[in-house]
Amino acid sequence: MATQQVLFDTDLIKRYDTAGPRYTSYPTAVQFHEGFSEADYKACATQSNTEKKALSLYFHIPFCNTVCFYCGCNKIATKDRSKSQPYLNQLATELQMQSALFDKTRVVEQLHWGGGTPTFLNDAEIVQLMDATRRHFALREDDQGEYSIEIDPREATHRTIEVLREQGFNRMSLGVQDFDAQVQQAVNRIQTEEQTFTVLQAAREQGFHSISIDLIYGLPHQTTESFMRTLDKIISVHPDRLSVFNYAHMPSLFKPQRRINEADLPSATEKLSILQHSIERLTEAGYVYIGMDHFAKPDDELAVAQRNGTLYRNFQGYATHADCDLIGLGATSIGKIANSYSQNLKNLEDYYARLDARHLPVFRGLILNADDEIRRAVITQLMCHFELQMLNIEHRFQIQFNEYFADELADLIPLQADGLLEYDEHFIRVKPVGRLLIRNICMVFDKYLRNKQNQQRFSKVI
């Protein structure tokens, strides 16, 4: 197991701060294509039943009451709460159609609601959706599943938290981003500390297993000093996990970002300073760097899973239940079934029309080939554990690692010279200075990048 220490080297980070995938999947969604059909999806579901992995369900709830200007998510901004019921009706149809494809004995180990704002749904609608889910899938009732939800504290009351806990949710992430009033005004997310900490306290009172708080650095008007004020307030309430995301300003891709004044964004040097001080502050407070943007208390399940070698990475980020078959439900959601990825239609009207015609709303996807599966295993292991035992890959896939990845190992030589990693004929180990640059290391093993087939504009790695 690699050390959990992380070192900040400003010069190295500046040199390696290129754009690249976040590797919530490999191949990435850029490779999905519309030649992947409903029939392909059904065939993969049949195959997955022979493997009998546990299931994971992801529900995309697209609605938001207001638009946060930094947001790059697939969402529908509306104050019309009546839009949620037709969506729930369609989700019930999709649940029924999906459940017919999967063995009823397969237990749902993971469940996640994302968005949008999942608590755009009222309490009765939350119960309605969970009731429909239980009718069609075997949910765990022993509180040992990983059942999580993304929360906007402005859209949740104490009673909302009670209802969520009663329905089996035991983990949540709270969106904060920044408490600074000027920053909040610039990104159109006005959220008080009281709103945030009231929800957090309610979650603790209700016995949620893990509470995570999301912050973003690189937003307009942020400085190292101002962000540290926010971070100190967050640390004082001891969340189990934190995510400190890099804001990726891509106004050509995400229209709300066009309302952010680029002149107000912190400089690249200031962003690095914010990140460096955040890592130092969180480390001093006893948090462990998990990887990418994530930190956790040493006794949190993410940190324990990383130490045990069981940490996994999927479309929701790091997870403790490794390699479930993931069923995506709702507009734009992504699934991973057997050796395939698939995505639902993004436009709400198209999504509804497909379900009304009694067809699954899958519109694109990908069936992984043997090379994809080998490279996914390598990238996942590096992303989650910062080391790779080549013999494990050789045994699993019946290859000679040094021969199969001869070009990639040659490309690691300059990264080794820069101190990002070390490798020999048996192991690749990411060194503390390379952990922040893990995406760069993984990109070496990305065949689509190597062949110039990943042309989408990705976010910067730092």
Image (cartoon, rainbow, N blue to C red):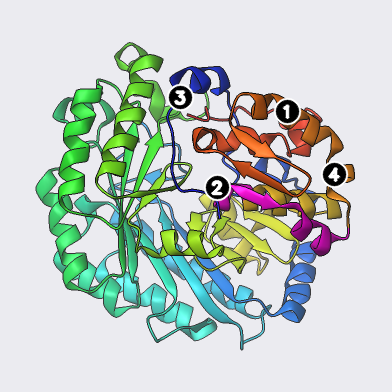
Q: Secondary structure at mark 4?
A: helix
Question: Looking at the image, is mark 2 or mark 3 earlier in the sequence?
Answer: 3
Q: Residues within 10 Å of mark 3 (few under 14, many from 20)?
A: few
Spot occupied by residue 341 in the image (x, y as percentages of width and height): 69, 56
Q: CA distance from mark 2 to mark 3?
A: 43 Å
Q: Amino acid at mark 1?
A: Ile
Foreground: 434 or 20? 434
Instruction: Name the residue: 33% across, 71% down.
Output: 170
Q: Secondary structure at mark 3?
A: loop
Q: Amino acid at mark 4?
A: Asn
Per the picture, the main secondary structure of the magenta-coloured stretch is: helix
Disc assigned to residue 9: 3
Instruction: Name the residue: 37% across, 81% down.
Output: 143
Q: Amino acid at mark 2?
A: Asn
Q: CA distance from mark 4 to mark 2?
A: 45 Å
Q: Secondary structure at mark 2?
A: loop
Spot occupied by residue 192 in the image (x, y as percentages of width and height): 13, 43
Foreground: 112 or 343? 112
- C-beta proximity under 8 Å, tags 1 and 3: no
Question: Looking at the image, is mark 1 or mark 3 earlier in the sequence?
Answer: 3
Name the residue tied to disc 2. Answer: 347
Q: CA distance from mark 1 to mark 3?
A: 19 Å
Name the residue tied to disc 1. Answer: 413
Give the answer, above or below, for where 317 lies relative to 87: above
Name the residue tied to disc 4. Answer: 402
Foreground: 229 or 249? 229
Q: Amino acid at mark 3?
A: Asp
